[in-house]
Amino acid sequence: MAGTGYLLGSGGAAPRGTGAARRSRLRTRAGLSQEGLGEQVNYSASLVAAVEQCRRPPRKEFAERCDTVLASDGLLARIRDAQVRESLMPWFREWVTIEQEATALCSFQQTVLPGLLQTEAYARELFERASHFLGDEVEQQVAARLARQEILHRASPPLFVAVLDHSVLERPVGGPKVMREQLLHLRQLGDRPRVHLHLVPRDTGAYPGLNGAFVIATPPQGDDVAYLDNQLQGTLVERTADVQSLRRCWESVHAEALSHGATIKLISEAADSWT
């Protein structure tokens, strides 16, 4: 994805600065300085400036508050949503649509935490050090990842079951502070009734999940769909035999894992160890 980023408007693709320019014009029309808008939406003037100068993508809450203060009828939130979607790699967009509509998601990760469970700092560290994204592209990807997580906070979220290899608690992504924040966040998410976390114990030997991470989505209608990640791009898996094979792998991996309660206990202990 190009470093400038793109978003969809009524006439097709447009530079990412279109949204920033629209926000600036609405602010000026309302007779507000950047400091004034910041006070109204309870964000710093420096953040308002960073968003208007395209140095930082807007958060959903920020865009919604600006819409309220500037009486823009949801325009800025819609632009922000389009901007986030267009920042995704083309081959990932179809999966995100499936993910957003799913009634259940079964995820396995053996190296890092699933994107839906990551904190902003943890996600940024991965994009900065374990991907090909640079500069402004990193912020776009972080914003897109955080936007995906909104499905877990909906009134009717999908059932999300994540099996994690114990090593994800021990890999120092971002250092002790980031890891402690991340694991405390993970523990909080585990309190949600439709989020189930299961750790494969540290002393487990070889098991099927070591062959790679995957996610299986159950749509409102139709057959399950799966997603595989690799170094180049992700792969959407729809062939029935392949999805069934991954489902069998999932059942085997899930059988190796600890209960949700035991997992939350270990996550809490691991969080305390990152000091």
Image (cartoon, rainbow, N blue to C red):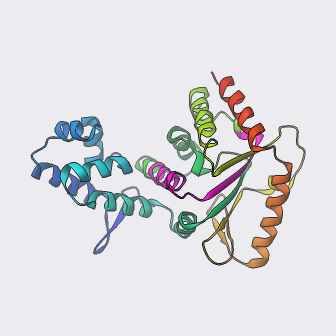
| View extreme (top): residue | 275
Q: Let me know if residue 226 is in the magenta part.
A: no
Residue visible at 19% across and 55% down? 71
Residue 159 pos. (x, y %):
64, 57
Residue visible at 75% across and 78% down? 240
Quarter where residue 234 is shown: bottom right
Quarter where residue 248 is shown: bottom right
Query: Is 168 rendered above or below residue 236?
Result: above
Q: Which residues are magenta?
A: 141-168
Q: Let me know if residue 150 is in the magenta part.
A: yes
Depth check: give the residue in front, 216 or 102.
Answer: 102
Depth check: give the residue in front, 53 or 34.
Answer: 34
Query: Is 114 rendered above or below residue 81?
Result: above
> Is residue 53 at all visible to an observer of this figure?
no
Quarter where residue 258 is shown: top right
| View extreme (right): residue | 205
Residue 242 pos. (x, y %):
77, 73
Residue visible at 32% across and 61% down? 79
In which quadrant of the rendered image does the C terminus lie? top right
Query: Is 250 rendered above or below residue 185?
Result: below
Residue 123 pos. (x, y %):
54, 44
Residue visible at 65% across and 45% down? 113
> Is residue 91 at all visible to an observer of this figure?
yes
Query: Is 4 rendered above or below residue 39?
Result: below
Residue 119 pos. (x, y %):
54, 41
